[in-house]
Image (tube, rainbow, N blue to C red):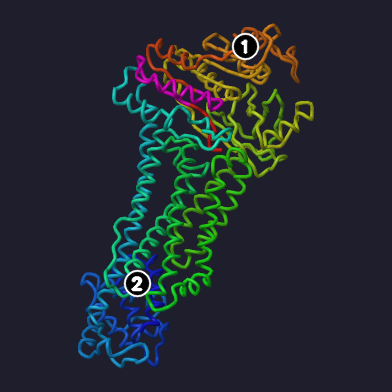
Amino acid sequence: MKSWSISAVLLLSLLTFVKAHDYGNACYIMCSSYIVGYYTTTTCGDDDDACQCTNYIYAESYALCLYEVCYEKEILDAWNLWIEDCMEDNNVSASGTYESNLAAGLADYVSSDSVNDTIPASTAVMPEYDYFRKRYLARFEIIHNAKWSEYFGNILNAYWGFVILCGAIKQVCDRFLPRNGSQLGIVSVFRRYITLPAGFGSSHIEPIRLGKVPVWTVYLRWQIIVVFVFFSLSIIFIFVNMSVINGEPIYVYNSLMQTNNLGVRAGYLANEMLPLMFLFAGRNNILMWFSGFSFETFNIFHRWVARMMFIFTCVHGWTYTSFYLNVGSAYDAAPDAYYLGDVVQDWGDMVGIIACVMAGCMMIQAAYVFRHHWYEVFLSLHMSLAAVFYAMVWYHIQANSYEEYMYCALAVWCFDRFIRICRIILAGPFTKATVTVHGDAVYISAKPSIHWRPTPGQYAFLYVLRHNAWESHPFSIMESRDGHYIFVAKAHAGMTKKMHKSVTKKSGTDEVRVWIEGPYGFSHALYRYDTVLLVAGGVGITSIISYALDLKRRGGQRHVILYWMVRNEISLNWTRQQLADVMEGGQIEVHLYVTGEADPSQDKEIPDSQSTSELEEKEVAALERLPILYNVRPDITQVIHDIVAAANSSVAVMACGPGSLADVCRSATTANVGNGHGRVDYFEDAFTWA
C-alpha cells in the first residue's frame, strides 16, 4: 500500500491544483485513487482507464467508496465526473448507474483490510471508514483551498476594476461638472491631501537621490494608497482561509499539508496576475481610455502587479521545494528523495525554477537607477527576459490545463502590437523627417501620409531607422502651419544623443526616415477654466504652446498666462512661428526667462541655419516684442499664489518641463486648493516611466 500512496500523494496534489471545478472532485479523486491502490485484476492494469470503466468490480467498489466516505450531496457529482471522464478520455460508457452498482456492491463486498495492491480482490471492496474519511477530508480541504485561491484572485482583479471605475467617474466629473463656484469643503480637502500632492514631501517627478545617484521617484499620494491596498490584500490572501486535517494519512504531517496549501494558493494568485501585468504595460491599453489614467500611472500599476506576481512565484517555488525536500521523511525515505527524483529530473518543474529566476532578474534590472540611466538597454533586456519567463511559465503549467491565463496574456500583447503596427502604417512607413539642431535640442519635422490633427498634450513614439530601428521614444507633438508635426527633445543619452551628434556633423541639418506611432495621450480640458497658467521649462514648451494655441483658437474671456524658462536664447529659433501665433492679438500674456548666461545688449535674433532675414515680418515683430528677462528665474510658488488670489473663479495650472519645475508647480498649486474663489486644479505633461 505504501508504494502507491506516495506516488498518489505527489500526483494528486498537483492534479487538484487545476481540476478543482467542484467539490465532487474530492470524492472522485480520492475514491478512484483508492481503488487503483487496493485493487487489481488480471484483465485491467492500474493505468488502464478504459478497462476500469467497463469493469463491474471497479464500478461497484467506486460506488461503495462514495457511499461510505463522501458527503451525500457530492456523491452524484463524483459519479458523473467518472462517467464524463470515461466518455471524454476513453470513449466508453461506464458500467451501470450509481444506484445499481451500489446495490450490487452492498450485496457482496470485502473489507479493504483484507486486500492490497498485491492481493487482487475478486469482489467489490468497502473502504475502512476512519482511515479513508480522513483521506477524503484532506482531499476536500485541498480542493477547498484551490477554490478560495480562485476567489481571492478574482477579488484582486475586481479591485483593479474598482480602481478603473473610480477613474472613469472622475473623468466624467472633470469633463462635465462645472468648474465655477466654490468647492465643497470635503472635496477640497480630499483633493488637497489625497489626489493632488506627492506621497511625501514635494518631490514627484524629480527623483530622490543617494548622493548623486537617482534611486527612485515618489508616487502621488492616491497612487500610493491604491498600490498599498493592492499589496495588503495580496499578502492577506496568501495566508487566510486555509486549514489542515489532524491525523490525515495523505501528508502525514500538518506542516506538509500547510506547505502544499500555501504553494497552491500562491500559484493560483500568480497565474491570475499574468494578464493584468501584460495589460497594464501596453501602450494601447483600452483601460486608459475608460479610466482617464495616464500611461505613467498604468506603468506604476504594472510594476506593482509584477512585483506582487514575483512574490507569489517565489512563495510558490519555495513552498513546493520545501515540500519535496521533506515529504520523504513522511514515508520513511530520505528527506530529499522525492526532490531529487520528482523535481530535478522533471523538466516541467525545472522550467518553473528558471521562470522564477527570470522574474528575479527582471525585478533587479527594472530598478529605477537602471531604467533612468540605461533605458534602451533596460527595455531590450526586459523584453528578452519577459519572453523567456513567459515560455517557461507556459511549459510549467500546460500539464495542469491552466493555459487560459497564458492565452489571455498573449492576446493582450498581440492586440497591443497589432495596434502599434496599424498606427505606423497609417502614418506612413516611409515617412521622411528633417532633423535640425538648436543648441542642445533636437528638432524633428515630419509630415505623415495620413494627416490627423493632434490635440494639445498628445505625443507619439518615433522610430529613427538609422539609429536602432527597434527602439522608439516618446515626443510631444507640436503642429506647424503647413501641417508638419514638430517633435523636440533635449539631447540626453541614447537615441537623442546619437541624432544630435550625427546632425551636428552635417552642418546642423539632416534628413532621416522615421516611423511615427501615435497619437497617444489625452488632452486636458483647460478651456473649462476662467484662468489658465501655463508653465514650461526648456523643451517642455512643445506641449505648453499647443495648449496656448488651442485656448487662443477657442476664444472666450478667459485669462491665459504663459511662463517659459529656457537656458539660452537660441531655443527661440525652433518656436518662433508658434510664439508669433501665440502673441498675435495680445490675448495671451507671455513671460520669458533666459536663465543661462546671456548678454542683454545683443540682438534677440540668434544666428541659425536659417537667417532671421528669411523670417516672416510678423514673426520678427513678435520676437522683438518678447519680454525677456535674463539670468533670473521667476518665483513660481509666488506666481501661483498671486494668480489664485486674484482670480475671480476657477484656475488651472499646467506644467511641462524638468521634474524640479513640475514638482514646484504641483506643490504650490496643492497649497492653494481651497484658497481661491473657485476650483483650483493642477495638470502636468511628463514622460516619467523611464
Q: Magenta region: which residues?
A: 655-683
According to the image, label 1 marks what residue?
630
State the image coordinates of residue 526 (x, y, percent, origin top left).
45, 22
Q: Nearer the viewer, residue 267 or 109?
A: 267
Rendering quarter of residue 149: bottom left
In terms of secondary structure, where does tag 2 sit?
loop
Is residue 327 part of the magenta span, yes or no? no
Examine the rendered structure and indicate whether residue 656 appears above or below residue 101.
above
According to the image, label 2 marks what residue?
251
State the image coordinates of residue 139 (x, y, percent, origin top left).
31, 70
Examine the rendered structure and indicate whether residue 664 appears above or below residue 452.
above
Examine the rendered structure and indicate whether residue 244 appears above or below residue 110.
above
Q: Amino acid at mark 1?
A: Tyr
In terms of secondary structure, where does tag 1 sit?
strand
Q: Split into 4 quadrants, where in the image is the N terminus?
A: bottom left
Q: Nearer the viewer, residue 514 or 452?
A: 514
